[in-house]
Image: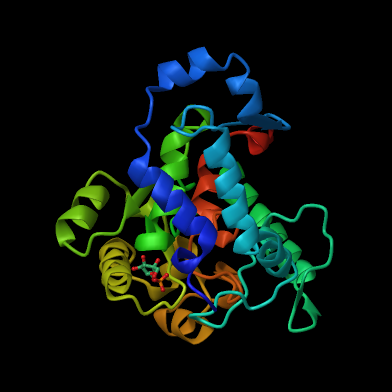
Amino acid sequence: MSRIYESDAWQTLLQRANTANPPHLRELFAADPERFDKMSLRVQNILLDYSKNLIDDQTLNDLLDLANEAKVDDWRRRMFQGDRINITEGRAVLHTALRNRTNTPVYVDGKNVMPAVNNELARIKKFVNQVRRGEWRGYSGKRITDVVNLGIGGSDLGPRMVTQALKPYADDRIRVHFVSNVDGVEIANTLRPLNPERVLFVVASKTFTTSETMTNAHTARNWLMSSAFDERAVAKHFIAVSSNKEAIKSFGISAENSFQMWDWVGGRFSLWSAIGLPIALYLALASSKSY
Ligand SMILES: O=P(O)(O)OC[C@H]1O[C@](O)(CO)[C@@H](O)[C@@H]1O
């Protein structure tokens, strides 16, 4: 595969970037009253406004030439159809399948993945409703009030960011905390004000071997045990989001308390997979009626 920076279109853009003396954004708007209309688009309720970038019509055309030369259309088509376009890992990049609410079949190695995606989403919904309605209870019969997500990097940042951003929509009967730092101060400070009888831990790790996450998960389990004194409590207070079934089992979490991460989604930044579970637990929206 040729390098994008070796393409003609890239070189043209580079030359423009190096020689052009960019005008102030105010001048660009003054010179073209249609600028906002030309450089923005609406998709349903989402507004994409790129008029505030330091670009003009020529730059836009050059960027489109670059997209054509890089065959973006073709790569996008291949991405949607489940080709292994992640060439470094030899994997498909099907975040789109997780958001495919039209249920158009999506094939990976000849198998439609949509039934599995829908099944997992249904399990997530059922579980979240049980917790939010207070049907899922801790080892002593008390309802869950705090969720602690244990994960790092992509198994932490996405849900952490979304819960922070959507705080106004949260139902504060369930608080969500995030612990990713292996420095024990973080988990100690998070757990100190919490009641072990009311805490649900979400261990989010695709591999279930990441040392920071597993260290925190063991700390959390010891903390629970210092109150519950019974290994059976783990089933009431720990769920896993992972693709490593064996490791989940040896930690003591049953298959029914674990949710799947897909091999055909590269990286972990897939909020629409079970990684988004803490978001669903946190937000009031649809499930608020069930109280
Ligand atoms: O989900 P896992 O297996 O615990 O891996 C987490 C690691 O994966 C990444 O999300 C992506 O490589 C890192 O940011 C992070 O350290």
Image quadrant where one finds the N terminus: bottom right
The image shows residue 118 at horizontal and vertical percentages of: 75, 62
Work out whether 103 lies above or below 193: below
The picture quadrant for ligand 1 comes to bottom left
Horizontal arrangement in the rendering, residue 224 relative to residue 203 (left or right):
left
- Residue at left 38%, top 25%? 23
Does residue 283 appear in this view? no
Q: In which quarter of the image is residue 264?
A: bottom right
By what rule are the colours in the image chosen?
rainbow
The image shows residue 258 at horizontal and vertical percentages of: 55, 70
- Residue at left 56%, top 38%? 58
Total marks drawn? 0
Horizontal arrangement in the rendering, residue 200 relative to residue 74 (left or right):
left
Work out whether 113 lies above or below 44: below
- Residue at left 54%, top 76%? 254
Looking at the picture, tell me which residue is in the foreground, 155 or 74.
Answer: 74
Looking at the picture, tell me which residue is in the foreground, 68 or 144.
Answer: 68
- Residue at left 23%, top 60%? 181
Image quadrant where one finds the C terminus: top right
The image shows residue 147 at horizontal and vertical percentages of: 42, 50
The image shows residue 150 at horizontal and vertical percentages of: 36, 61
Does residue 11 appear in this view? yes
Work out whether 213 lies above or below 11: below
Horizontal arrangement in the rendering, residue 135 relative to residue 191 (left or right):
right
